[in-house]
Image: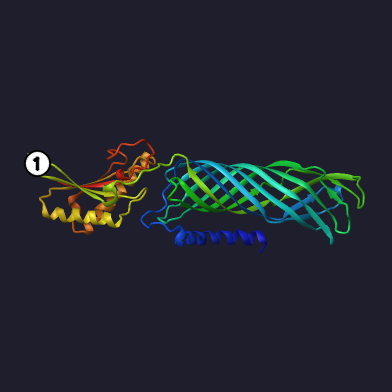
């Protein structure tokens, strides 16, 4: 197995390990009831790390005088990325990235024994990427992505020659740059920094490949010991594959700041509305939910149990269970989420002894908020289910 293939397999296996370390480390421990939320709206991201470049196959024109295919080998180098994206609140994100890769050439093979090599290969490009956050209810959120674009490849003073010679046998007197189609695959993890709203740390593996064959590179040849070129030709490169491990940051540009649950949202609430003169009293219980979640916290289960017990102690003709969301996320998604919340509360009421045929459920999405907000704002008191005893 080549080093590149070994590293690719190892990197994919390492991502769950990185997630486990983040999830269990005391420095990064998160409240189990507060999983990583879905990103919504515009954001920026940046990252840096190490790039592992596969050995390239170089095919030279006959004019150069080195028939056949040869391999160019590179040291591990640097990688960086900066992106601007938009998240849709459902896990899907679209992002435009600019990337930078830098690797030093360390050797060549296929030219015979005793040859040395040097020079830099640098890549700068732009990619359009589609990414998807996989919400599993964990403190860390895995994500995957693919993208396409173009990279400019700069070969800077690449040279090779016999080790015994003080002058190069061949080299680029100046740097050469060519463009090529690029494609990428991404596997990563994000972890929200709770004390900075909208900020997340990221750790990711990126694969970047260039289309084959790449543009021709002009090349000069020199006899050993001479500074006068005797000929030239072109070189074609194939098999340019890059694998990077990077850490970075992602920041939501318009994340809500300073929005914390009020007393009712923090502990659950029971609201007794004054009864009309001609009707029986109406008792309303509020059950609050974490953002983008439909499961019950410990306190929420207590509130549902109180409602179930009250239904046996007062004259109840029907029980309405109405689900709601805040104004973040899409309207269709919010409608489904609010219904899932109502179904969760209904199931808990049934477990607490309430006959299912006495319960009517509805999901109203982001309609009828307790606190009016602008679109996209994550208001904790609007993420609720109302249990109404009639």
Q: How far from the left and from the top, in percent, is residue 387?
A: 21, 48
* Number of marks in the rendered image: 1
- In the figure, is residue 53 to the left or right of 297? right
In the current view of this chain or complex, which residue is farthest to the left?
Answer: 278
**Location of residue 326 by image quarter:** top left
User: In the orientation shown, which residue stands out farthest toward the bottom?
Assistant: 1
Residue name at image x 91 percent, y 45 percent? 228
Image position, residue 322 (x, y; %): 25, 45
Relative side of 2 to 95, left or right: right
Q: Nearer the viewer, residue 335 or 379?
A: 379
Q: How is the protein colored in the picture?
A: rainbow
Instruction: Name which residue lies at 16% across and 56% down.
Output: 309
Q: Is residue 390 left or right of residue 137?
A: left
Is 246 displayed left or right of 70 in the figure?
left
x 37%, y 40%: residue: 377
Location of the N terminus by quadrant is: bottom right
Q: Estimate how packed mark 1 is, as few (under 14), some (14 to 19) or many (20 or more) residues with alpha carbons within 10 Å.
A: few
Element class at badge 1: loop
Mark 1, residue position: 279
Report the residue at 23% width, 49% height from top.
269
| Near-viewer residue (301 or 364) | 301
Task: Say above or below: 21 vs 236.
Answer: below
The foreground one among 84 and 68 is: 84
Percent across and percent down for residue 95 are 53, 42
The answer to whether residue 308 shows anywhere in this view is yes
Q: Position of residue 10 (x, y in %)?
A: 59, 62
Whether residue 349 is visible, yes or no, is no
């Amino acid at each position: 197995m080549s080093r590149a293939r070994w590293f690719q397999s190892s990197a994919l296996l390492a991502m769950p390990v990185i997630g486990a370390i983040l999830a269990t480390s005391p420095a990064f421990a998160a409240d189990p009831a507060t999983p990583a939320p879905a990103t919504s709206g515009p954001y920026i991201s940046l990252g840096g790390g190490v790039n592992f470049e596969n050995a390239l196959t170089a095919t030279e024109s006959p004019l150069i005088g080195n028939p056949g295919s040869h391999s160019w080998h590179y040291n591990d180098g640097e990688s960086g990325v900066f992106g601007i994206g938009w998240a849709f609140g459902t896990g899907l994100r679209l992002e435009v990235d600019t990337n930078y890769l830098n690797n030093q050439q360390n050797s060549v093979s296929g030219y015979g024994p005793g040859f040395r090599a040097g020079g830099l290969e640098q890549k700068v490009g732009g990619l359009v990427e589609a990414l998807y956050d996989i919400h599993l209810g964990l403190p860390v959120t895995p994500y995957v992505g693919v993208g396409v674009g173009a990279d400019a490849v700069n070969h800077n003073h690449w040279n090779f020659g016999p080790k015994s010679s003080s002058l190069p046998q061949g080299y680029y007197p100046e740097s050469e740059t060519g463009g090529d189609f690029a494609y990428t695959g991404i596997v990563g993890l994000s972890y929200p920094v709770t004390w900075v709203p909208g900020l997340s740390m990221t750790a990711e593996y990126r694969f970047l490949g260039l289309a084959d064959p790449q543009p021709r590179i002009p090349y000069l040849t020199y006899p050993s010991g001479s500074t006068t070129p005797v000929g030239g030709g072109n070189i074609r490169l194939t098999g340019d594959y890059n694998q990077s491990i990077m850490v970075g940051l992602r920041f939501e540009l318009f994340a809500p700041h300073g929005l914390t649950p009020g007393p009712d949202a923090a502990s659950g609430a029971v609201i007794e509305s004054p009864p009309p003169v001609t009707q029986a009293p109406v008792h309303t219980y509020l059950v609050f939910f974490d953002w983008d979640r439909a499961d019950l916290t410990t306190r929420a289960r207590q509130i549902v149990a109180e409602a179930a017990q009250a239904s046996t102690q007062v004259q109840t003709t029907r029980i309405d269970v109405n689900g709601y969301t805040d104004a973040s996320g899409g309207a269709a998604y919010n409608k489904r989420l609010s219904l899932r919340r109502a179904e969760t509360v209904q199931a808990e009421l049934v477990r607490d002894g309430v006959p299912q045929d006495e319960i009517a459920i509805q999901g109203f999405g982001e309609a009828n908020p307790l606190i009016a907000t602008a679109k996209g704002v994550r208001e904790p008191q609007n993420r609720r289910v109302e249990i109404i005893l009639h």
